[in-house]
Amino acid sequence: MGLIASVTYFLLMEHRQHLFLYLPFIIILLCPLMHIFMHGGHGGHDDHAEHDEQGEGSGNESEAYKRGLEEGRKQTHKHNSH
């Protein structure tokens, strides 16, 4: 923490002109870093699995997928047996 404080003080006191010149770019570069490191604050993405299980129509989509999978297997078996 002391090293960070001393570097910050040095930048602000000795290189203020250079710092303010690049300040817009620094802010833009901080946006993705803040997104990466601060994303876990709202619980991450763990609640997506619960949402999929409780979502509207998830049972219908699952059943339709299973029926389509079985029909595809039957058609493949018919083509392979000829």
Image (spheres, rainbow, N blue to C red):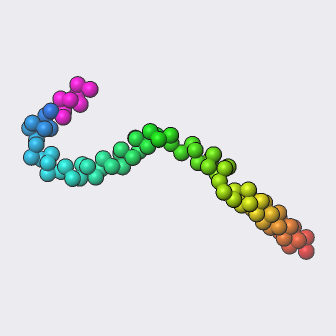
* Magenta segment: 1-8
Q: Quadrant of residue 45?
A: top right
In this image, 80 relative to 5: left or right?
A: right
Which SS does the magenta portion mostly show?
helix
Question: Which residue is at 20% across, 29% downward?
Answer: 5
Residue 74 in the image: above or below residue 12: below
Q: Quadrant of residue 66?
A: bottom right
Percent coordinates x, y for residue 3 in the rendering: 23, 27
Residue 49 in the image: above or below residue 70: above
Question: Which residue is at 33% across, 49% downward?
Answer: 31
Where the C terminus falls, by quadrant? bottom right
Question: Which residue is at 50% across, 42% downward?
Answer: 44
Residue 56 lies within the magenta run: no
In this image, 52 relative to 6: left or right?
A: right
Q: Quadrant of residue 58?
A: bottom right
- Total numbered circles: 0
Where the N terminus falls, by quadrant? top left
Percent coordinates x, y for residue 26 in the rendering: 24, 48
Q: Is residue 80 something one can see in this rendering?
A: no
Percent coordinates x, y for residue 78 in the rendering: 88, 71
Q: Is residue 67 something one can see in this rendering?
A: yes
